[in-house]
Image: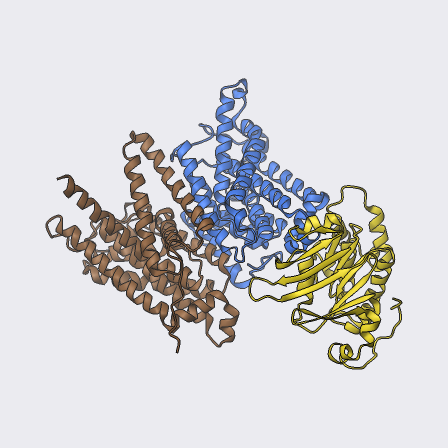
Amino acid sequence: MIDFVNQYLIPALVLGSIYALGAIGVSMIYAILRFAHFAHGDLMATGAYIGLLVVWVLDATPLAELSVNVRLLIGLPLAFAGTAAVAILIDRLFYKPFRRAKSMIVVVIASFGVALMLRSLVQLFFGVDVINYADGIQFPLKMFQPLRILERHIYIVVVAIALMLVLHYFLTRTRTGKAMRAMSDDADLARVSGINTERVVIWTWILGGGLVAVAGVFLGMDTRLVPTMGWDMLLAVFAAAILGGLGQPYGAIAGGLIIGAMEELSTYPWIGDGPLVPPDYKTAVAFAVMVLMLIFRPQGLFRGRVL
Amino acid sequence: MLEAKGMIGGYGGADILKGVDVAVNAGEIVAIIGPNGAGKSTAMKAVFGLVRLRQGQVLFRGEDIGRCEPDELVRKGMAYVPQERSIFPSLTVHENLEMGAFIRRDDFSHVIEQVYTLFPPLRDKRRQQAGELSGGQRQMVAFGRALMTEPALLLLDEPTAGLSPVYMREIFERVIAVNETGVGILMVEQNARQALRVAHRGYVLATGENIFTDTGEALLANPEVAESFLGGHGGQAGRSGAGA
Amino acid sequence: MEIYGLFLFAVGFLTMAMIYAVASLGVNINWGFTGLFNVGVAGFFAVGAYSSAVLTAPESVHHIGGFGLPVPVGILAAMVLAALVAWPVGKICLRLRSDYLAIATIGIAEILRLTFRNYQPLGGGPFGVNNIPRPFESLPTPWDQIAFLLLVVAIVGVILFLVQRAWTAPWGRVLRAIRENEDAAEAAGKDVEKFRLQAFILGSALMGLFGALMAHYVKIISPEGTEPLLVTFLPWVMLIVGGAGNNRGAVVGAILVWGLWTMTELLTGRLPDDWALRVGYLRIFLIGLLLQVVLQKFPGGLLPERPPTVPRD
């Protein structure tokens, strides 16, 4: 039982939190801008590498004494802000020209290009090799024995929950957050109501880009950094957003946790001795869930939009 | 207050408007009526900058607003209620009204109070999602949302479309009540006879052109208008509330 | 000598450009003709490349094989298998709107690549398939290269001829109608789903052919060779630069973009090794930027789509 929790449930929660932070952005961008943002994974990588820069810079200061996890927590706001700024810039340059276009598919094509441009910049500046935020093995915290909970697991889950609460407050209590929900309900009506839709769009990128950057730093914390890390996450993040119902930020959170759990739990030896799904094929689980959803319930669990 | 002259344009294909004039004086209720496809809604959208005109001019309080974005027009004192999808369904009634006041940075709680006074059913449902309301109540939300900026000119695109006669009468009564506070109203209406009873003046459009322009009463009395555009003789729906 | 080197280089360049033109034409049948947003080229490429490779390559300890079948059989099988994979994918996904099709095709491609990478018996796993025969390789240089180029040119020529006929035929007209207004096409009594499926399968078969030709040309196929950047993205950029909906545009785009790709490689090749590798990624950036510029400034591409002229009476 403890083994099950340690080897499957805890990783599932961690991975699910990371997916959820990514899926929120995909979901909101779809609802407000009406297109599937395929560069979202690479924004995640951008955030992760900004985190790396922060770790490096802090290495040269007295703060180098701090553990790498704490240095990364310091870096989170910077990764959030930096990636949000990158996202806004990308939107201005490459997506905004098509804002009033009849078919948004051209923006999807543009976002493919952006995905590769972002990745190539990461490769240019950081090379293609796998990088770790810090060398060495982290040990489970003693106080939770026999549960194997690492310090980073606590940070990841706690910060993810905190960010989701902030998001909830933003969407339901602030003028801009409500305008964001209004625009995702009906962009045309929002426009004729006098809502400054371009400002809502900027906020969408701030939240979407910022949250996915945090997801990227967490993914790097939990695994390692490699320029394709974002692209490799894209499918799972989309699966989570679709599962939750596009345009439903809370649905995206649930979808992220479910997809994370399904991927991890699929490797448990449910039948016989070997893993049910070999770990190498874990990604296929997210995809299978997504295809089943597309066939049987395209609106998602939480009644989102159908593309 | 509003003066649109010689509007020619459409959605990119053939022109739908082939030279339409529409004007609203301060404090007036003006109705645009006409058969389907006459360009009524298009004319209203053109006034609100949602249809790009090839030719013609739209003046609001003497200022050319032909190139203005909707949010600028709202700031200048116009408000627009589209025919369909006129509410934010997943937002509560209260939030819908708040969104109507998006451009306002001052305290607008008294305006919300006025809207609840004008549409009492909304007060009880203010915490409900607008999408759960009945058709008539949704229309009240839409109407109320547009009033939040305290506009000088309100554009209503078929405010009674699809409503039961009871709600239709209710909405027309509110149109009059709002107008009595000094708000100019331009409405496109399919229920032509009732609309003309409420309106001070009316425009009859057909195939993208003005056919008749007169006071509401005169148009109702005009046998040609009655024959072609009011469905012959007939006096369903009483005059109650139509005090204009 | 210098000239001879240049000549060989040109032959190699044109061969690659023509192989890419096959992919670009396939994308055109999907996107240009029918508006299907298939971004799973890498998956169909992999199916084509691996099946032709396994069927024709000599025996190896790393994977099933040793069939030693003739290359034309392998190539034909590649197209058929790619089409067979496309059929269920299309059946399931074509009902969905374009964004979903994109996600689904990316997913299929990733899973196929995952399978080829991890399941060694199928395609040698990380080792890939080596020693794939190349037609005419027994000829003395440069004739082997020239002959192969001529073969690829002939293939592109035949495809171009057929696809152009399809474009002007009633079949192409229906596809365009579906692309422009699905509901209207449906109302006109066209079995929209059937036509879209046909276009999807046909395009995918060409992507399989693309894989097979590439495998035979470079003589090796491994998981790295199915990188979506190279096999999905480039053909897409080629089509959009050349002009979506225009078959000749697809070919011209392939030559131009491959030219750009190769030229930048020549430039970066002169840098020190470490930097050459890194600056190499700038080319990807530039190709991405080229795509953005074309999308915004030349939405029709260099050779914009022209509806076939219908003879009037």
Q: Residue furthest left?
A: C140
Answer left or right for C26 relative to B216: left
What residue do we see at 27% from left, 38% from top? C266
Quadrant position of residue B243: bottom right
Question: What colour scheme does the image use?
Answer: by chain
B189 in relation to A277, above or below? below
Quarter in which the N terminus of chain A is drawn:
top right
Chain A is shown in which shade?
A: blue
Q: Across the whole image, how many numbered discs are drawn on residues?
A: 0
Quarter in which the C terminus of chain A is drawn:
bottom right
What residue do we see at 36% from left, 54% from top? C242
Quadrant position of residue B56: bottom right
Q: Position of residue C293 (x, y in %)?
A: 44, 46
Chain C is shown in which shade?
A: brown
What residue do we see at 50% from left, 57% from top? C100
Observer-nearest of C161 and C196: C161
Observer-nearest of C92 and A99: A99
Q: Position of residue C128 (x, y in %)?
A: 28, 48
Res. C296 visible in picture: yes
Q: Position of residue B24 (x, y in %)?
A: 78, 60
Observer-nearest of B214 and A300: B214
C168 in relation to B48, above or below? below
Q: Position of residue C25 (x, y in %)?
A: 34, 59
What residue do we see at 28% from left, 54% from top? C19
Chain B is shown in which shade?
A: yellow
